[in-house]
Image (spheres, rainbow, N blue to C red):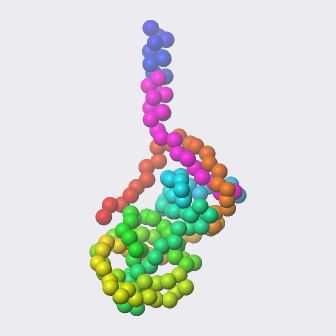
């Protein structure tokens, strides 16, 4: 009877530990931890150090976004071309931007990666992501040093996502 109780306790602990999901951590070729891998085919990561989501192309470069503006001269609050969850960091030219919220707007201009301003001939209202320049240095070099390597770990990391 004692052995059955001990076995039942062991199975209960093992079952509780088994319910924690395994996470796949990615490391660049220099052994620097990039973060928890969220998807393949392009790479999406959650970096625990900066507590942000990042997306990379298969060549190791940060996915770039477009900057659009409600003004006709690329001034004012920068917006991203489509709505997205807050906390995502992406690149535009040499700078990083973070999505902070979403809003309904009518874009009248857009900024090219070379810094020049373009004008929309027929602006359409829609929901866009509000972005701010992200000034915190990334804890790894960009572009990523490929090939990436992976390791699994069991944990129950909770990733907070603000809701607007």
Residue 108 vertical position relative to residue 15 in the rendered view, above or below: below
* Residue 134 seen in this snapshot: no
Q: Nearer the viewer, residue 104 or 6?
A: 104
The image quarter containing residue 119 is bottom left
Q: Residue at x 59, y 61 (%)?
A: 58
**Whole-percent x, y for residue 24 in the image:** 55, 47
**Whole-percent x, y for residue 126 in the image:** 30, 74
Q: Residue at x 48, y 73 (%)?
A: 65
Residue 102 vertical position relative to residue 109 in the rendered view, above or below: above
In magenta, the rendered stretch is 11-29
Left or right? Give the position of 51 relative to 139: left
Q: Nearer the viewer, residue 56 or 95?
A: 56
**Whole-percent x, y for residue 152 in the image:** 58, 43
**Whole-percent x, y for residue 91 in the image:** 52, 72
* Residue 109 seen in this snapshot: yes
Which image quarter is the C terminus in? bottom left
Left or right? Give the position of 76 relative to 137: left
């Amino acid at each position: 009877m004692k052995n059955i109780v001990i076995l039942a306790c062991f199975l209960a602990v093992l079952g509780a530990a088994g319910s924690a999901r395994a996470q796949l951590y990615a490391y660049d070729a220099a052994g620097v931890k990039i973060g928890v891998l969220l998807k393949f085919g392009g790479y999406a990561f959650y970096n625990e150090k900066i507590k942000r989501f990042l997306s990379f192309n298969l060549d190791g470069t940060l996915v770039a976004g477009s900057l659009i503006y409600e003004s006709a001269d690329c001034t004012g609050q920068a917006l991203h071309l489509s709505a997205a969850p807050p906390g995502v960091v992406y690149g535009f030219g040499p700078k990083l931007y973070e999505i902070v919220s979403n809003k309904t707007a009518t874009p009248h201009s857009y900024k090219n990666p070379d810094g020049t301003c373009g004008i929309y001939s027929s602006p359409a209202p829609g929901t866009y992501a509000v972005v701010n320049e992200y000034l915190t240095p990334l804890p790894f070099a960009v572009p990523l040093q490929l090939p990436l390597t992976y390791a699994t770990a069991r944990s129950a990391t909770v990733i907070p996502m603000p809701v607007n």
